């Protein structure tokens, strides 16, 4: 069995969510992930924030972050309270809306 890198794991989560989102009824959309899966996505994103990437990998991370923002409501619905997390790690604050990424960029 191949070991997935953090970027591959992040990609798998987000592309699966994006695909499944179009296949479920609207009332089941927010149930696509459990709170544990949301934690996993945010922890993986923490790992990615600390990593060094090539230009191509940075572009892929930006694309995947776009998917995360596209489906921010799923994250927000299942996100536990992590107010102690750095605002630079905007993915932990998606319960405040997708604008948290831009706000984090403004602070950085």
Image (cartoon, helix red, strand yellow):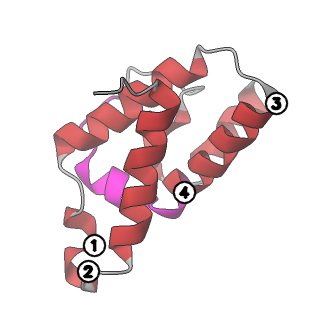
Q: Residue furthest bottom?
A: 25
Of pointers 1 and 2, the one earlier in the residue sequence: 2
Q: Mostly what secondary structure, the magenta segment?
A: helix
Report which residue position mark 4 lands on.
67
Q: Does the CB distance between marks 1 and 2 fall below 8 Å? A: yes
Q: Quadrant of the C terminus?
A: top right
Report which residue position mark 1 lands on.
29
Q: Quadrant of the N terminus?
A: top left
**Residue 25 forms part of the magenta stretch:** no
The one of 4 and 93 positioned closer to us in this rendering: 4
Q: Does the CB distance between marks 4 and 1 fall below 8 Å? A: no
Measure how far apart labels 3 and 2 are at the Cα level: 35 Å
Q: Nearer the viewer, mark 3 or mark 1?
A: 3
Secondary element under disc 1, as helix, strand or loop, is helix
Measure how far apart labels 3 and 1 are at the Cα level: 33 Å
Residue at the location (28% across, 83% down)?
Answer: 26
Of pointers 3 and 2, the one earlier in the residue sequence: 2
Q: Nearer the viewer, mark 4 or mark 3?
A: 3
Secondary element under disc 4, as helix, strand or loop, is helix
Q: Residues within 10 Å of mark 1 (few under 14, many from 20)?
A: some
Which numbered marker is on residue 55?
3
């Amino acid at each position: 069995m191949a070991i997935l890198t953090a970027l591959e794991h992040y990609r798998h989560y987000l592309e699966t969510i994006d695909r499944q989102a179009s296949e479920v009824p609207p009332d089941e959309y927010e149930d696509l992930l459990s709170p544990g899966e949301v934690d996993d996505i945010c922890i993986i994103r923490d790992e990615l924030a600390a990593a060094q990437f090539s230009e191509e990998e940075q572009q892929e991370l930006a694309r995947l972050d776009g998917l995360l923002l596209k489906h921010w409501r799923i994250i927000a619905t299942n996100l536990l309270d992590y107010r102690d997390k750095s605002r630079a790690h905007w993915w932990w604050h998606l319960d405040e809306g997708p604008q948290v990424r831009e706000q984090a960029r403004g602070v950085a």
